[in-house]
Image: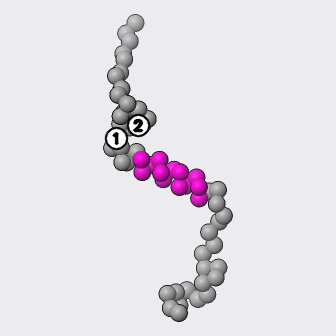
Amino acid sequence: MNTVTRNVDDSQRGRTTGGDPLTTLAERLGRRLNADAAESEPLVVGADSGDADTEGEP
């Protein structure tokens, strides 16, 4: 039986693709933001804004 072992240092642990650590961090933050958004109240666009034509005007 052949056994293959892979040495993984602490900087590699937790990476799913072994890619750029900033990309991995951005993916994790994106998942967290999506989860937070799913738990929050729904966003109602234009509920208090009046006419769309006057957006940004006093």
Image position of 7 with respect to 42: above or below: above
Q: Which mark is residue 19?
A: 1
14 inside magenta stretch:
no
Residue on which the image places disc 2: 15
x%, y% of residue 5? 36, 17
Mark 2 vs 1: CB contact within 8 A: yes
Image position of 32 with respect to 40: above or below: above
Three-letter amino acid code of the residue under disc 2: Arg
Relative to residue 51, is residue 28 drawn left or right? left
Where does the magenta region start and end?
Answer: 25-37
Q: At 53% across and 93% down in the image, what residue appears?
A: 58
Label 2 sits on a secondary structure element that is loop
Three-letter amino acid code of the residue under disc 1: Gly
Of 28 and 52, the residue lying toward us: 28
Around disc 1, counting alpha carbons within 10 Å, would you say few (fewer than 14), some (14 to 19), or many (20 or more)?
few
26 inside magenta stretch:
yes
x%, y% of residue 8? 36, 26
Q: At 34% across and 41% down in the image, what residue appears?
A: 19
Q: Which mark is residue 6?
A: none
Of the 4 image quadrants, the one containing the N terminus is top left
Q: At 55% across and 86% down in the image, what residue appears?
A: 52
Around disc 2, counting alpha carbons within 10 Å, would you say few (fewer than 14), some (14 to 19), or many (20 or more)?
few
Label 1 sits on a secondary structure element that is loop
Q: How many tags in the picture?
A: 2
Q: Predominant secondary structure in magenta?
A: helix
